[in-house]
Image: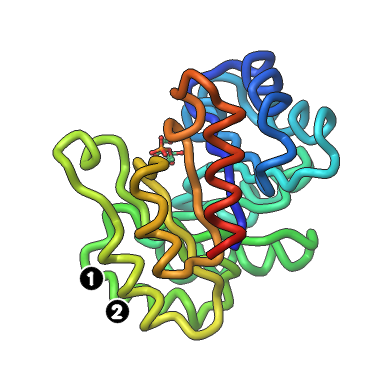
Amino acid sequence: MELQLALDLVNIPEGIALVKEVEPYIDIVEIGTPVVINEGLKAVKEMKAAFPNLKVLADLKVMDAAGYEVMKASEAGADIITILGAAEDMTIKGAVEEAKKQGKKILVDMIAVKNLEQRAKEVDELGVDYICVHTGYDLQAVGKNSFEDLQTIKRIVKNAKTAIAGGIKLDTLPEVVNAQPDLVIVGGGITAQQDRRAAAAEMQKLIKQG
Ligand SMILES: O=C([C@H](O)CO)[C@H](O)[C@H](O)COP(=O)(O)O
């Protein structure tokens, strides 16, 4: 099980400073969608240059023209690129094909997918690397989480690795770890804590024990 730190509400220097605090405890650093919108793929490039030993995920949430977007993110240094599960099959196939060419991985974000069982099965057959259940900020705000959805994809997915994102905190991490995803994605559960290093260290401990 791996731990991914999601950076969403920072600029590039703040992001780099934050990763410096928690580097020993994380496996992957995510350049979140808001950071990509504000800073572009330069954020991926600078993060990879600052931390060549960490995997960098570009949270592009690709919906169309995946071959081109995956190529650009790969050129910037991303190791993993996200695409939406709601995208057309041919878009997801395009992403997988380009990622293979570039030696990169594709994570499918199942945010807002209505028939999770059916879509997870379909997407799994398209050869993606990760399938991620995700409760976005808007549904977190009304008290939702993806813990049940994680059980669902653990049952359905046969080939891809499983991942979970959205509002995971230290007190809810044990429930997540119990379900044994391959990847746990945490943003505010680390970045919004007073002692980020301690939060990340504790999370890594729970994940490695699990
Ligand atoms: O993907 C995310 C969200 O859609 C904003 O881009 C976050 O990175 C993801 O939800 C993890 O962040 P937290 O919910 O703060 O843990």
Q: Residue at x 60, y 20 (%)?
A: 39
Residue type (three-letter) at the residue carrying disc 1: Asn
| Residue that label 1 marks | 115
| CB atoms of marks 2 and 1 within 8 Å | yes
Q: Is residue 117 left or right of residue 64?
A: left
Residue 121 is situated, as x and y percent measured from the top left of the image, at 39, 81
* Total number of numbered discs in the rendering: 2
Q: Is residue 72 above or below residue 95?
A: above
Residue 3 is situated, as x and y percent measured from the top left of the image, at 59, 50
Residue 44 is situated, as x and y percent measured from the top left of the image, at 70, 33
Residue 33 is situated, as x and y percent measured from the top left of the image, at 49, 34
- Cα separation, mark 2 vs mark 1, equals 6 Å
Q: Quadrant of ligand 1?
A: top left
| Residue that label 2 marks | 118
Q: Residue at x 21, y 64 (%)?
A: 114
Q: Residue at x 35, y 41 (%)?
A: 167
Q: Quadrant of the N terminus?
A: bottom right
Q: Secondary structure at mark 2?
A: helix
